[in-house]
Amino acid sequence: MYLDKAKIRQSFAAASVTYDGVAALQRTVGKELLDIIAAGSLTGTLLELGCGTGFLTSGLLKSGRPIVALDIALPMLQVTRTKLAGTPHVFYVCADAEQLPLNGQIADSVFSNLALQWCTNLEAVFTDIKRVLKPGGRLVFSTFGPQTLQELKSAWAEVDGYNHVNEFYSEQQLIRFLQLAGYTEIKIETKLYISSYGSVLDLMKELKQIGAHNVIAGRNKSITTKTQMQRMIAAYQKHRSGDRIPATFEVIMVSAS
């Protein structure tokens, strides 16, 4: 899997204005991640990878610890900075999680909410996070699993053979990457979230508004035709229940040290 980082940066930069209005799932998962973290028990410096518009950052601030908030999209980082204006001990870094511009052993804990799925080489990412963590430090993150948007994948599969939906790593792959990177204490939990929409176009509009529409490099470069879109929407209707269509999101939550 190869992801186009320029497109990822552009997508999330463009979504910085609309993100908070539609990112209900991200907030729900973020709250559950904060429950796992037990923010009050945190010590030392915290690093957040992919801070987005600052939902998890705000929760982590309750620990009273210094936070380094990092995001690949500058407009996202600016939204967080505006929200947290006047808050002490928050440091902002615009950078790619796959190329951390940070010294070694600076963080006691590293957190990430639904951001690491935008990284191609997770073994390298986990190894670099290990470098940034102090000895005994912990990585806690959530990411999407392979069942995510399975209805949309199957609908597009009836239209053509191209990837219209991003592929995501499985629980087993994540464990392997973490082990190869030197993590020995790994706790992992997978949950399925089913969101519902009035139409397929509503789902696709939301994905665009949170910056999560397809960014696979090397996919079909031709513009999707109206006929292809109509065929995909017709194929999706087999999943309809009443006046709503479902969309599955598989979320994998991990704690590793």
Image (cartoon, rainbow, N blue to C red):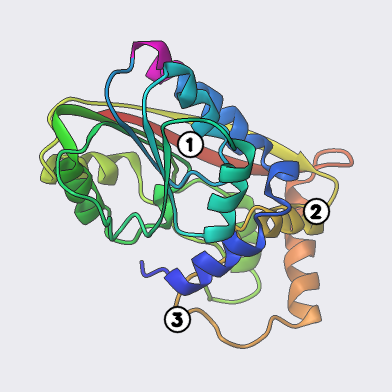
Mark 1 crowdedness (10 Å alpha carbons): few <14, some 14-19, many ≥20: many
Q: Is residue 228 above or below residue 199?
A: below
For badge 3, the amino acid type reads Gly
* Residue linked to disc 1: 251
For badge 1, the amino acid type reads Val
Tell me what residue is drawn at x 65 percent, y 54 percent.
16
Q: Earlier in the sequence, mark 2 or mark 3?
A: 2
Q: Quadrant of the N terminus?
A: bottom left
Question: Would you identify the image quadrant in which residue 55 lies?
Answer: top right
Q: Is residue 83 above or below residue 3?
A: above
Is any part of residue 246 visible from this angle?
Answer: no
Is any part of residue 185 visible from this angle?
Answer: yes
* Residue linked to disc 2: 202
For badge 2, the amino acid type reads Asp
The numbered mark at residue 218 is: 3
Q: CA gap, disc 1 to disc 3?
A: 26 Å
Q: Earlier in the sequence, mark 1 or mark 3?
A: 3
